[in-house]
Amino acid sequence: MKIWKISFLITVCLTIVFLAGCAAQASDVLVAYTRAGGIANLNDSLTVYRDGRVTVTRRGNQCEFILDRGELKLLEETLATAGLADLDRQYLPENQGADLLEYAVTYNGRTISAQDTAVPDSLWPVLELLNQTAGKCS
């Protein structure tokens, strides 16, 4: 009986440590970005962490690198001034097309999705910088 109680307590403690670690990892993300579709049938994703680490998945390959302080600061400023909190959650074009790119940016727990020809002006600088960052893994 005593062994069962000890096993149970160890399991509870490990579960708490695991869940705390998962929560810390999620809060480490500065921005997550996906770009999909288009003629090239892209399916790219990029995650930038608050410490400057970057993970890019592109064409089935994964690449990791670290932004320098200047690059990270520029990204943080671009995100902060884009007014993402004021944007609608989704922007769709009036005329759908098979070759349109779809973008999704998640920042501060909020995701903004848009397709080509319907991207709001304030979102373009963010997309351009994220595409440039992802391009480091070409």
Image (tube, helix red, strand yellow):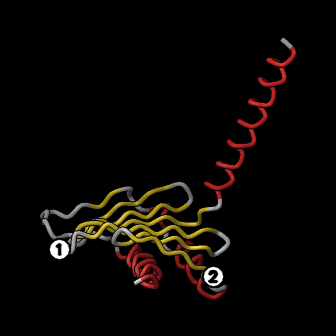
Report crowding for label 1: few under 14, some 14 to 19, many 20 or more residues within 10 A (C-alpha): few
What mark, if any, has residue 39 been given in the picture?
A: 1
Indicate left or right for 88 with 23 as reference.
Answer: left
> Closer to the camera: disc 1 or disc 2?
1
- Say which residue appears at 34% left-offset and 66% top-offset: 103
Picture layout, residue 133 above or below residue 83: below
Residue ranking furthest to the right: 2
| Residue occupied by mark 2 | 73
What mark, if any, has residue 54 been given in the picture?
none
Kindly state the secondary structure of the residue where label 1 is placed.
loop
Within 10 angstroms of label 2, few (less than 14), some, or many (20 or more) residues?
A: few
Location of residue 82 with respect to 13 vertically, above or below: below
Residue, x 35% and y 76% (percent of image)?
A: 121
Tag 2: residue type? Lys
Q: Quadrant of residue 70?
A: bottom right
Residue 114 place in picture, x, y as percent: 31, 64
Q: Amino acid at mark 1?
A: Ile
| Front position in the image: 93 or 137 | 137
Locate the C terminus and report the quarter of the image it occupies: bottom left
